[in-house]
Image (spheres, helix red, strand yellow):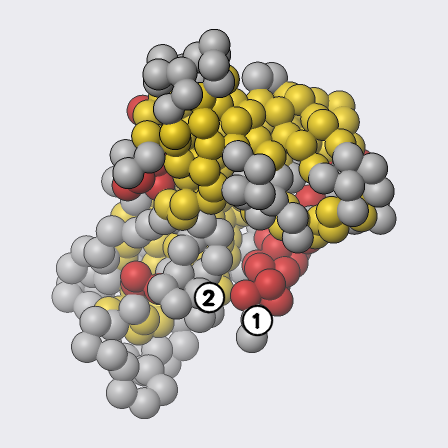
Amino acid sequence: MKSRDCRSLVSLLAMTLMACSSQSPSDGGVDAQRPQDASAPEAGIPAMCSPPMGTPPASAVCVRGVTGLAQSNDGSPLANTVVTFCGTACFATNTDAQGRFELPVGEVLVLSQYALQVHGRPQHASAYWLLPAPDANGIVRMPTPLQLPRYMVSGEELPMSMRIETARTITVGEVTLQFSAGSRVEFDLEDFELMALGRTVRMAEVPLDRAPPFAAEASVVGPVWAMGPFALVSDRPITVTVPNRTALAAGSPVELVSMGHDVLSSPPTAGHFVLAGRGIVSSDGRTITTVSGAGPLVLTWLAVRPTR
């Protein structure tokens, strides 16, 4: 399956769950690979893992389920929000009224090939998280709340035709995006189904200490920016201008870093940082702009760091 097809499948699964107020628990499959002390599983999480087909890799582990807490950045719960756990297979659930989730898996898999996504749209950003090892009972417990910021809506829409006939400059907050004439863009299915709102450029600025783990992995400086439409793909580089929050020297080169979103690449990039472009600090030191032809091709989350 192509990565784009997989992303569409993830979005379709998320939209299906959004339409449901509750989810039937997974039955967990055939008894196999019983983890230590699994006699009292969480509600809805399989008691055991299904037997793997063939010989699993040495790094494969039994993952009975994933548990955690989804919140807005202000600490309020993200209730009835879709959470997916995807790699070569995909699993999903909804959060409860307190933002907690128990996601049933019940499979033997290589955890490094998977990422957890909290689908915050339309009001909040979406993001990926990498997962810690499962505990002795085969449950992956996310150690801290998974926090998503609320978008600031710009009010400017990208065309439904997905082709940008004339050059467009869209500013939301202190972030500016420039799309060159003739660019073709492709929306993630979740944003496409949101119609005008999904095509609207959105942004939320997030302090570094509240950013998803990709930012720390990349050693970025300053805040990060959650962008929407999330996972928007362009066939031509997007010119990005962001404020120089950390007083990098005027004229100094920087790297634009983004959150990876591909769950099927080898290795998967979802939840990791990827180098998305190159930029330079303006002569007055106030902003950072990507150099011509070196902007991102995908919009997820953006951050900057000095060139290495």
Please report the residue visible at 27 percent of the width from the left and 81 percent of the height from the top.
56
Residue 96 appears in view: no
Give the tally of numbered discs: 2
Q: Secondary structure at mark 2?
A: loop
Left or right: 198 as drawn, with respect to 34: right
Mark positioned earlier in the residue sequence (2 or 1): 1
What number is the disc on residue 264? 2
x and y percent of residue 41 in the render? 29, 59
* Relative depth, front residue between 92 and 153: 153
Q: Amino acid at mark 1?
A: Lys
* Relative depth, front residue between 288 and 187: 288
Alpha carbons under labels 2 and 1: distance apart = 8 Å
Name the image quarter holding residue 239. Answer: top right
Contact? badges 2 and 1 (CB < 8 Å): yes
Q: Secondary structure at mark 1?
A: loop
Residue 157 appears in view: yes
Left or right: 120 as drawn, with respect to 68: right
* Relative depth, front residue between 260 and 35: 260
* Relative depth, front residue between 130 and 266: 266
x and y percent of residue 22 in the render? 58, 50
Name the image quarter holding residue 152. Answer: top right
Residue beneath disc 1: 2
Quadrant location of the C terminus? top left
Please report the residue visible at 75 percent of the width from the left and 23 percent of the height from the top.
155
Q: Residues within 10 Å of mark 2 (few under 14, many from 20)?
A: many
Q: Is residue 90 above or below residue 219?
A: below
Q: Amino acid at mark 2?
A: Leu
Q: Is residue 146 above or below residue 24?
A: above
Quadrant location of the N terminus? bottom right
x and y percent of residue 182 in the render? 78, 47
x and y percent of residue 282 in the render? 48, 18
